Image (cartoon, grey):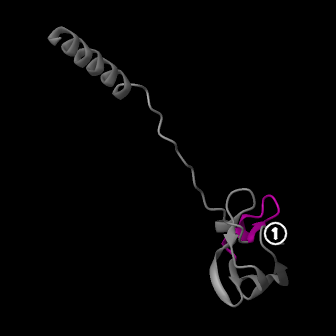
Amino acid sequence: MRGVVSSLVLATGLFGSMVVTGCVQVPTEKQGVVDLRPRMAFRVPEGNNTLMDARVSVDGLEVGKVGDYLDGKSALRVLGGNHVVRVFDNGKVFVDEKVYLGDGVDRTFLVK
């Protein structure tokens, strides 16, 4: 009887270790955040590098230079809604527009 019991214990031990050492794949979940805020960028005519230093303001708040937000390279994210966009330099105004930008909208302004 001892031989049967020890064989049973040995078999249970082998079976138990096979279950424990089995391949287990942990479920994964990928999460991300989508930013749908409108974006605005600026385009200047080729060869006119002086406009790259023109200042940009949105709703009266200066946010940087035209060169900081070039079309195809970077963009300025704003909240959806009505905005007043101005581009100016040395007393000259190159862009002065009131625009509505909804979620997911990209708008490029031509500075000339």
- Residue 53 placement: quadrant: bottom right
What amino acid is at disc 1? Arg
* 82 versus 67 height, above or below: below
Q: Secondary structure at mark 1?
A: strand
Give the residue at x 75% y 71%: 38
Q: Is residue 43 magenta?
A: yes
Res 83 → quadrant? bottom right
Q: Residue at x 69, y 83 (%)?
A: 57
Q: Which quadrant does the N terminus fall into?
A: top left
Is 70 located above or below residue 79 in the figure?
above
Residue displayed at 32% across by 25% down = 16
Front position in the image: 3 or 69? 3
Q: Quadrant of the C terminus?
A: bottom right
Q: Is residue 44 magenta?
A: yes
Label 1 sits on residue: 107
Q: Residue at x 81, y 72 (%)?
A: 111
Asked whether 25 or 62 is in front, the reply is 25
Q: Is residue 30 left or right of residue 57?
A: left
The stretch in magenta equals: 38-54
On the image, the x and y values in percent for residue 27 come to 51, 42
Judging depth in this view, the residue of 17 and 36 nearest the camera is: 17
Instruction: Tell me where residue 6 appears, x and y as whole percent.
Output: 19, 14
